[in-house]
Image: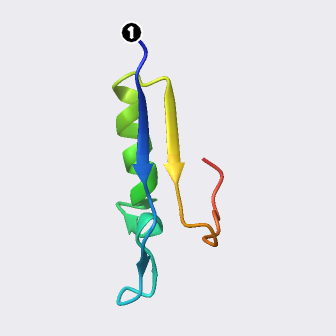
């Protein structure tokens, strides 16, 4: 059976000064850590839901 995942990556980190999904942890954005973990589980589709006006500044 194939499984898919939706990552809810909206939410501006106003106190942090940048979008939370793109904060670096161990040299990589948090969002990338999530995607890599889901790929290791063998998920065939990963959808990243961002805010309508949120830029997506990285090539994943």
Q: Position of residue 35 (x, y in %)?
A: 44, 42
Q: Position of residue 58 (x, y in %)?
A: 63, 58
Q: Position of residue 40 (x, y in %)?
A: 37, 28
Q: Is residue 48 left or right of residue 33?
A: right
Who's the residue at 66% across and 52% down the image?
59
Q: Is residue 15 left or right of residue 53?
A: left
Q: Quadrant of the N terminus?
A: top left
Q: Which residue is mark 1?
A: 1
Name the outermost residue toward the top: 1
Occupied quadrant, residue 31: bottom left
Q: Is residue 33 above or below residue 40?
A: below
Q: Secondary structure at mark 1?
A: loop
Please state which of residues 37 and 14 is positioned toward the viewer in this rendering: 14
Q: How many numbered marks are there?
A: 1
Who's the residue at 42% across and 61% down the image?
27
Callout 1: few (<14), some (14-19), or many (20+) C-alpha neighbours within 10 Å? few
Who's the residue at 44% across and 59% down the image?
9
Colouring scheme applied when the structure was drawn: rainbow
């Amino acid at each position: 059976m194939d499984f898919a995942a939706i990552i809810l990556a909206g939410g501006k980190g106003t106190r942090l000064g940048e979008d939370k999904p793109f904060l670096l942890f161990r040299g990589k954005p948090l969002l990338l850590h999530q995607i890599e973990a889901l790929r290791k589980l063998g998920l065939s589709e990963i959808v990243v839901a961002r805010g309508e006006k949120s830029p997506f500044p990285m090539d994943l």
